[in-house]
Amino acid sequence: ALPDDWSTGNIKGIKGRGNFTVNMEWNNGQLLAAEIYSGSGGNCRLMTSVPVKVTGAIAKPISDSNSLHESIEKPAYFKNEKAELQELLLEKRYVIDFQTEKGKTYKITTR
């Protein structure tokens, strides 16, 4: 997610969870390309607003992005009849996992 004022740009050296370093470039608010360097190896999970392709690894789509969000029982929901709820405009999200090797860089592009 980028501010509207940053419609075109790039960023280098962003650290991600799992000891990943990210460089990326975008134009008109759309990803052109990104590189992810794996400092430790292991699983890398990406959440994007558009489908992406990973060069150098096999990416697998994830349908449930976090099993920790599951609850044992679902509480009952009661809506106040007088309440006016606002419509939420949520963008579709794509979540993928891919295994990385320590010291290797992976290129991310839109499909």
Image: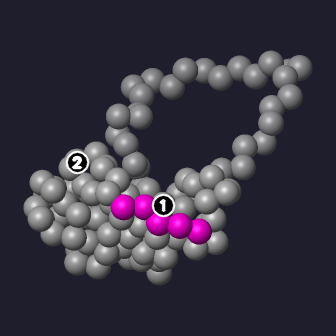
Res. 2 visible in picture: yes
Mark sitting earlier along the chain (1/2): 2
Residue 48 - label: 1
For badge 1, the amino acid type reads Thr
Residue 52 image position (x, y, % from top left): 43, 72
Residue 5 in the image: x percent, y percent? 67, 57
Q: Residues within 10 Å of mark 2 (few under 14, many from 20)?
A: some
The residue at the point 29 percent across, 79 percent down is 55
Q: Position of residue 7 (x, y in %)?
A: 63, 65
- In three-dimensional space, the C-alpha distance between marks 1 and 2, rounded to whole angstroms, equals 18 Å
What's the residue at 47%, 66% (across, down)?
Answer: 10
Secondary structure beneath disc 2?
Answer: loop
For image coordinates 38% across by 70% down, the residue present is: 34
Residue 18 is marked as 2
Tell me which secondary structure the magenta stretch mostly adopts: strand
Tell me which segment is drawn in magenta.
Answer: 8-12
The kind of residue tagged 2 is Gly
Q: Position of residue 31 (x, y in %)?
A: 51, 71
Relative to residue 23, is residue 42 depicted above or below?
above
